[in-house]
Amino acid sequence: MNYSKQREVVLDALKENVIHPTAEQLYSIIQIEYPQVSKATLYRNLSQLAEAGIIKKIDGLEMSSHFDHNTHLHYHFICEKCGRVYDVTSNVAEDVVKKTEEETGFRITGHEIVFKGLCKDCQK
Amino acid sequence: MNYSKQREVVLDALKENVIHPTAEQLYSIIQIEYPQVSKATLYRNLSQLAEAGIIKKIDGLEMSSHFDHNTHLHYHFICEKCGRVYDVTSNVAEDVVKKTEEETGFRITGHEIVFKGLCKDCQK
DNA sequence: CTCAACTTGATAATCATTCTCATTTTAAAC
DNA sequence: GTTTAAAATGAGAATGATTATCAAGTTGAG
């Protein structure tokens, strides 16, 4: 990855804003000081930086929402090779919620866990 | 919620397809037998059914991705009132991953936990 | 300095989803 | 069974987030 002023600006803006901004929020922030940075450049750099592990993209699955007829508490595993979504049940996770609630003081009304990796079939 | 043939079709299609389809996949599936069901109706019914707790929408945060400069292992809490995203650290979660890997046989290379609820400020 | 590889800006294109609105269906009351 | 207001529909326009296109500018190894 070559150096570029714009990428530095994007990374700095992200460092200075601990609010977990969306791309759009970041765009607004950057516009104030560097109005010449285009949206395309911003998105490109966010992807590249995330790809390189320098920043992290926070989201569940891909773009579009998946729907599930099973409303019981369970989680999901998405295979990075075949894209299939599997159900995962875990009772340990209850503890995580309880512990987190105690430690943070937040009232937690819902949670979602998404695991990623290779499913059995794709490990072959 | 009144009865409607279309809603029944949507729900049945979801019951019969355990693949956690996206709205778009569901649309294709439904088109085969019921080409008169429009996309608007599909999306509307998915929202309504999810709202009523009959089905579940699987996704992380809202529409747009958030970015994080902190690439260390940590999770997120999103306040449903003010929309702020907070960092959450938990060591218990390690167990969940290990246990899940053992139970499922999947190779888990990443995971993401998103908690939702009310932050301290918004509980007042 | 030179040139290929990398980046950029502007804008068009795409994809998922929501909105609009005129028309149709549902269900409860008569 | 007819009336009628609320709920639901279909078609397509509108929106929002993100990606693609492409000509022009920048970077860095040799």
Image (cartoon, coloured by chain):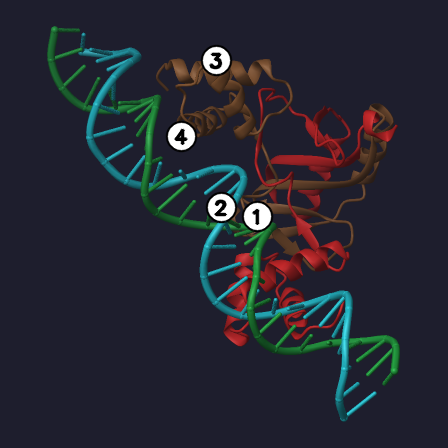
Chain colours: A brown, B red, C green, D cyan
- Separation of marks 4 and 3 at Cα, in angstroms: 17 Å
| Chain to which the residue tagged by mark 4 belongs | A
Q: In the image, which is nearer the foreground, mark 4 or mark 3?
A: 3
Residue at the spot of label 1: A119
Dot 4 or dot 3, earlier in sequence: 3
How many numbered circles does the render carry? 4
Q: Residue at x 68, y 71 (%)?
A: B8
Q: In the image, which is nearer the foreground, mark 2 or mark 1?
A: 2
User: Based on the displayed image, in which of its 4 quarters is residue B92 positioned?
Assistant: top right
Residue at the spot of label 4: A40
User: Do discs 4 and 2 share a chain?
Assistant: yes
User: Based on the displayed image, in which of its 4 quarters is residue A14 positioned?
Assistant: top right
Query: Horizontal placement of D30 versus B15: left or right?
Result: left
- Separation of marks 2 and 1 at Cα, in angstroms: 8 Å
Residue at the spot of label 2: A81
| Chain to which the residue tagged by mark 2 belongs | A
| Chain to which the residue tagged by mark 1 belongs | A
- Separation of marks 1 and 3 at Cα, in angstroms: 46 Å
Q: Position of residue A79 (x, y in %)?
A: 55, 46
Q: Residue at x 50, y 24 (%)?
A: A27
Q: Position of residue A1 (x, y in %)?
A: 37, 20
